[in-house]
Image (cartoon, grey):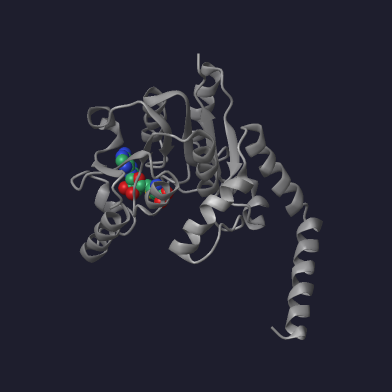
């Protein structure tokens, strides 16, 4: 890079930072606050990055970018490093990209990932799966991503998961339907399936419903309300990690999403 464009880049970055600060966003304070959430759970995000980044570099050609990439990649890397789970359950496989990351982060663990069966009324109506070619492509990518020997795919609506999946699990990722009623029973059943000392993580938790929200399954306060209901009764607090630190999101608290983490007490 020539010195002039380097200077221009630095000036642009400084201007952007100053503008964010003037709008009340302090990137460093946010980074420290999020780091402290890991520390409170006795997790080490810096050590976890050294496990995660080579996997991401190989798969996507870049390390974890806190502004753009979901924090759940790093959170899982940290929980796996600290607790060496032997059995992991993922509700919502989709393309299996995260399942593949999990299989690399925890090669000794048995990973069960479930998604809707083909004849479920919803399966072909989301993620562009209405189109036959797109659906075939989705299945092929899902199959390829979940081909590691420690992954088992299960085709079941999570409503019926107790008929197909046996606990206990040490780590559960709730990332299927994000709205009522499904996410409420997903969380309740996941809690049942979780071993004492195990960790329950949920994606896309929204404490607030954006005023301009539609009724999409990914814009719902259902998981937040269910987690708070559960936490008040099991004597364990829920930690909420900012899903992405991008200031555009942080400056719009109504639209902010979190990844939650709740550890099951050992009694
Ligand atoms: C957000 S995607 C999962 C993404 C994936 N976990 C990841 O991190 O890359 C949600 C998936 O959940 C599936 N799903 C939705 N409702 C479900 C249900 N009731 N039971 C099982 N899977 C469901 C959808 O078909 C979709 O593939």
Residue 148 location (% of width, % of height) = 31, 51
Q: Residue at x 50, y 37 (%)?
A: 221
Residue 25 is at least partly visible in this image: no
Q: In the image, is 254 to the left or to the right of 107?
A: right
Answer with the quarter of the image where residue 159 lies.
Answer: top left
Q: Residue at x 64, y 57 (%)?
A: 248
Answer with the quarter of the image where residue 178 lies.
Answer: top left
Ligand 1 sits in quadrant: top left
Q: How many marks?
A: 0
Q: From the viewer's perspective, is residue 241 above or below residue 101?
A: above
Instruction: Name the residue furthest front.
Output: 108
Q: In the image, is 83 to the left or to the right of 152?
A: right
Closer-to-camera residue (177/192): 192
Closer-to-camera residue (215/172): 172
Q: In the image, is 253 to the left or to the right of 54?
A: right
Instruction: Name the residue furthest top.
Output: 267
Q: Residue at x 38, y 22 (%)?
A: 192
Residue 15 is at least partly visible in this image: yes
Residue 241 location (% of width, % of height) = 60, 41
Q: From the viewer's perspective, is residue 68 above or below residue 154?
A: below
Q: From the viewer's perspective, is residue 67 above or below residue 199?
A: below
């Amino acid at each position: 890079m020539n010195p002039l464009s380097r200077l221009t880049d630095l000036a642009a970055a400084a201007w952007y930072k100053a503008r964010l600060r003037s709008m009340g966003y302090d990137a460093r304070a946010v980074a420290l606050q999020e780091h402290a959430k890991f520390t409170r759970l006795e997790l080490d995000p810096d050590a976890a990055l050294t496990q995660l980044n080579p996997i991401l570099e190989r798969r996507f050609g870049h390390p974890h970018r806190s502004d753009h990439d979901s924090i759940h990649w790093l959170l899982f890397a940290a929980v796996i490093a600290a607790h060496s789970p032997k059995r992991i359950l993922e509700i919502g496989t989709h393309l299996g990209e995260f399942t593949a990351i999990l299989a690399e982060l925890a090669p000794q663990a048995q990973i069960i990932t479930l998604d809707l069966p083909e004849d479920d009324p919803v399966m072909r109506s989301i993620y562009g799966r209405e189109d036959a070619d797109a659906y075939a492509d989705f299945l092929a990518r899902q199959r390829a991503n979940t081909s590691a020997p420690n992954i088992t795919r299960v085709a079941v609506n999570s409503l019926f998961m107790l008929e197909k999946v046996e606990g206990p699990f040490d780590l559960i990722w709730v990332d299927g339907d994000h709205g009522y009623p499904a996410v409420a029973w997903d969380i309740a059943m996941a809690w049942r399936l979780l071993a004492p000392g195990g960790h329950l993580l949920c994606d896309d938790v929204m404490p607030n419903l954006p005023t301009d929200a539609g009724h999409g399954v990914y814009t719902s306060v259902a998981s937040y309300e269910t987690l708070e209901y559960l936490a008040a009764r099991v004597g364990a607090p829920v930690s909420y990690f900012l899903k992405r630190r991008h200031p555009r999101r942080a400056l719009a608290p109504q639209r902010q999403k979190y990844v939650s983490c709740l550890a099951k007490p050992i009694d």
